[in-house]
Image: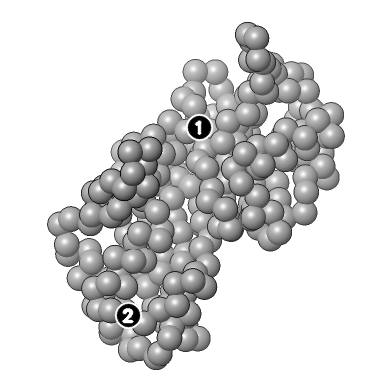
Amino acid sequence: MARIRIAFSKEDPVRWLSHLDTQKAFERALRRAQISLVFSEGYNPHPKISFASALAVGVISLGEYVDVEIDPLIENAELVMRLQKAMPEGFRIIDAEIVPPGQPALMALVNRAQYRVKVPLLSSIEEKEVQDSIQTSLDLDSWLVERESKKGLVQKEIRSGVYEVKGTVVENHLLLEMLVQTGSEGNVRPEEVLSMVVQQKDLPVQLERLRIIRLGLFVVKDGKQFTPLEVLKDLR
């Protein structure tokens, strides 16, 4: 029995799958690939499959991670090949690594997400307006956003979870890249960062045609940034 960490991407057409449907797609593909899953105990046993972070519907991701417990162990390259053949179009299995015993759960490990947001402009703007709007946003001490909860709309402070924002104008589109908090300590949504930047200088963007790519998930510890696979390779 072993825990395997798998890196994968999720692009068209499967970017429209929900997180639950993505879980089901992996479970079915692992079975089609004849990779034996380990199940939990109890009255309702379920396969031990754990994703790093849920991905919003419609968002493309180039760097997702899932931990899967299997028995017997399969060599990493063979697992990647067999699983890729069984996955629906749009999923690409990138790599796999064995997780040594005693390592924390994937969800507890990942604490950063990098996004690229592209949105059409309604009218042309100067590059300086973008840079001024980003800097004004970052100079603010507080970023209060509203979110739906079981108790209705609640306000949440997210400024401390925004670590980096860069932006430019490309072919009449506003392009932002950001590094934000994710994981068990809280999540910052890319739409919230875009909204805050746009508000500062009233940038003319077409929000209904927003396109978001999650470039990767990361682990920051001791001031250094790693992917969840690099964390494992560093243990060798």
Q: Residue at x 78, y 49 (%)?
A: 88
Which mark identifies residue 203? 2
- In the image, is residue 122 above or below residue 117? below
Which mark identifies residue 106? 1
Q: Which secondary structure lies at badge 1?
A: helix
- Please tell me which residue lies in front, 123 or 116: 123
Give the amino acid at mark 2.
Answer: Leu
- Please tell me which residue lies in front, 76 or 154: 154
Crowding around mark 2 (Cα neighbors within 10 Å: few <14, some 14 to 19, many 20+) is some
Q: Residue at x 60, y 36 (%)?
A: 66
Q: Is residue 104 left or right of residue 158?
A: right
Q: In the image, residue 102 lies at what x, y percent?
A: 49, 18
- In the image, is residue 132 above or below residue 233? below
- In the image, is residue 43 above or below residue 197? above
Q: Tell which circle, 1 or 2, labels the residue nearer the N-terminal end.
A: 1
Q: Residue at x 53, y 61 (%)?
A: 213
Crowding around mark 1 (Cα neighbors within 10 Å: few <14, some 14 to 19, many 20+) is some
Which tag is nearer the camera, tag 1 or tag 2?
2
Q: Is residue 107 left or right of residue 11?
A: left
Q: Is residue 164 left or right of residue 98?
A: left
- In the image, is residue 190 above or below residue 1? below
- Please tell me which residue lies in front, 202 or 97: 202
Q: Residue at x 77, y 35 (%)?
A: 28
Q: Quadrant location of the C terminus?
A: top right
Residue 103 visible in the shown view: yes
